[in-house]
Structure formats: C-alpha cells, structure tokens
Image: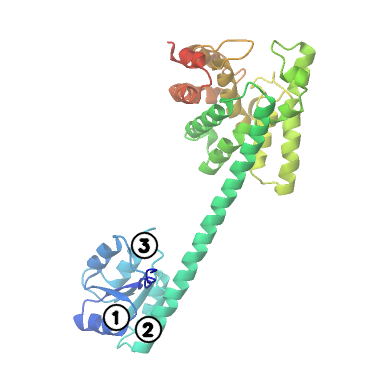
Amino acid sequence: MSPLPQEPLKPVVLAVDDAPENLHALIEVLKGDYNIIAAKTGEKAMAICSKTPKPDIILLDVVMPEMDGYEVCRQLKANSKTETIPVIFVTSLTEAGQEAQGLSLGAVDYITKPIIPEIVKARVGNHLYLKRHRDHLEILVAERTREIALIKEVTIESLATLTECRDPETGGHIMRTKNYVKALATRASLDYHFTGQLDPNTIDLLYLSAPVHDIGKVGVPDTIMLKPGKLTPEEFELMKKHTIYGRDSLRKAERKLGGNSFLHIAQEIACSHHEKWDGSGYPFGLSGQDIPLSARIMAVADVYDALISRRVYKAPIPHIDAVKIIAEGKGKHFDPVLVDKFLEIQDEFRSIALEFADFDEEREALTLE
C-alpha cells in the first residue's frame, strides 16, 4: 500500500506583544491555519529569528519596553538572514506619521488594535502568498544564473578540448594555467595598481577564459604543430599566427553574444598573451599597459608552465630556476608588478604544478631545491 501523502507544513507566524491578552487574541484567530510562536519582548523575538527555521511572517507590536517594535524591525531588515521576512505592525497607534515610520523601516503592512479577525487573516494570508511567489522567483533567478555560468564554463571547456586534440603538448597545461591565472589575479587584486580591475567576477572570467589562450593553434598546419624539434624562423612566423586565429574566432562569437560577453576576456588572452612588457612580443608589439591586463597575467602563467613542463625538445626545469627566469623578465617580458605578485605566491604556483603534473619527471623537477 502506498503511504498517504504528507500534509503540507503550516507557515510559521511569530506574534510579538508585551500584553498576554493581545498575544492570546492573535493565537485564537490564526491557530487553525498556522503554527504560532509567541514572544513578549523584542529581545526574545530577535532570538527566535536568529534560529533555523525562521518565521515565515512576523506580527509585531510597536510599543514595548526596552526594545520597541521599530527597533526590532530595523534590526531584522539590517540582517541579510532575516531581511526578507515580512513584518506587519499590530498596534493601537493610529497617527499617519507613525504608520509611515514603520513602513519606511521595511514593514509590509499595518493592523490597528483592537484587531478584526477577518482583516488579520486576510492580510497575513495575502503577504504569505506574495512571499511564496517572491521566494519562487528568487529560486528561478538563481537557477538561471547557475545555468548561464554553466553554459560559459562548458563553452570554454569545449573550445579548450578542441585545442588539446590539436596540440600534443597541452595535457595538464590547461588545468595548471587556469589555476595559476586565478591565483595570480587574486593576489594582484589586493595591489593598488589594479584597483577596480580585478573584482571577483573578473577573476572568475579570467579563470574560465584561460584554457582557450591557444585556441588559435587549430589553424596552424600539422607539419608545424606536430614537429618534434625546434621550429625554423619561417615555421615560427606561421606558429605566431595562432594568436590572430584565436582572436578572430573568439571575436566573431563575441559579436553574436554582444559586446560585453564573457568571450571578450578570452579573445584578449588569445590574442595578446605573447606580447611583452618591453614591446618585443607578438603579434602587434604592444608594450606596457597597452597590453590587456588579462593577457599580462596569462603571460606569467604560460611561461612558468612552459618552463616546468616536459616537451619533446626539452626536459622540465626545477621550480627554483623557473622562478629565477620569471624574475629576470621583470620589466622586460613581464609586467613588473605582476612579477612581484608572482614571487609572493610562487609556492602556490608550485603546488598547482604538482597537483596537475603530467609526468613523474615534472614532479621530480618541481621538488628540487
């Protein structure tokens, strides 16, 4: 036999009044439809609201000793955990200014004493109905926000996977570099040089976008991509075009999604992560702060990872030597402030490299002092 369906839980009403007869009157009116919690002081009401589960609605007297209803409402609305609980003042105060004061504090309604049962029931029911719909809307918005974030992540990961299929040297490179980028951007966000440029949302976008920094390699011929040795100058010129290929493909996608899409940072990184602070990089020879900050961060991450990784044409070098090379590139290859930030968190870079290392040879080199 199937179990009987459970009866829906009754909404919880917190009634607050220092007069027992007033509390008794509210309980008698509402007890059939709601679970009632009673409190005789503002302090007790605040204590109840600090616990879980919280009341669904509060009927609050105004004139109470020590902490009055206005102060209770003010504190509830100032707390993110209780600000959404509807508050209805139940009071004998009838002046318009007093009602306006309560509403300005965030109360949703006023009921005057002596209470009329039908009015109390109607207003409590109406505001609970509105609260249920508001809560449902917030859930829908949160779900949609998560869905959009997932679409961004899946899109970037799909593009990055495409790069892996064409580049035999990526492997853990994608996982390492995006975590380097997040670590460096997080530390740099604390420096005044980057005030307002590296908020949490931007750092998240950098983390998501970093994996496609080499997406343009899909346009480079196999004879170059799969060559086991060093490239000739002519071959290297063709390889350098991967920055333009990546920028152009991501820019087309960005235009379709809108100018402020999450792909904007991705195309900045793809295009400019081989630019150098002194202007000697490619594809455009940008220098200094003309290089997008996203690409400057990626440059440090990309070079560090290339140094500590095994390649068909080289062995991995120890972490300490990679750090030295990055430091020597300060103000030449790399943004000098970002190099300082890198040096501050170099151990975090090593930890990331160890976690996502592809080969034992790389792990051994990372542990050398």
Residue with the mark numbered 2: 121
Foreground: 145 or 67? 145
Quarter of the image for the C terminus: give it: top left
Who comes first in sequence, dot 2 or dot 3? 3
Binning the other alpha carbons within 10 Å of mark 3 as few (below 14), some (14 to 19) or many (20 upward) gives some
Instruction: Determine whether label 3 and label 1 are within 8 Å by CB.
Output: no
Q: Is residue 196 visible?
A: no
Q: Along the horizontal axis of the image, is 219 left or right of 199?
A: right
Residue with the mark numbered 3: 82
Who comes first in sequence, dot 3 or dot 1? 1
Residue at left 21%, top 69%? 66
Three-letter amino acid code at disc 3? Thr
Foreground: 174 or 256? 174
Residue with the mark numbered 1: 31
Considering only vertical position in the picture, is 169 above or below 80? above
- Real-space Cα distance between discs 2 and 3? 23 Å
Binning the other alpha carbons within 10 Å of mark 1 as few (below 14), some (14 to 19) or many (20 upward) gives few
**x, y percentage for residue 321?**
51, 11
Q: At numbered mark 3, what does the secondary structure look like: helix, strand or loop?
A: loop
- Real-space Cα distance between discs 3 and 1? 23 Å
Three-letter amino acid code at disc 1? Lys
Q: Along the horizontal axis of the image, is 307 left or right of 19?
A: right
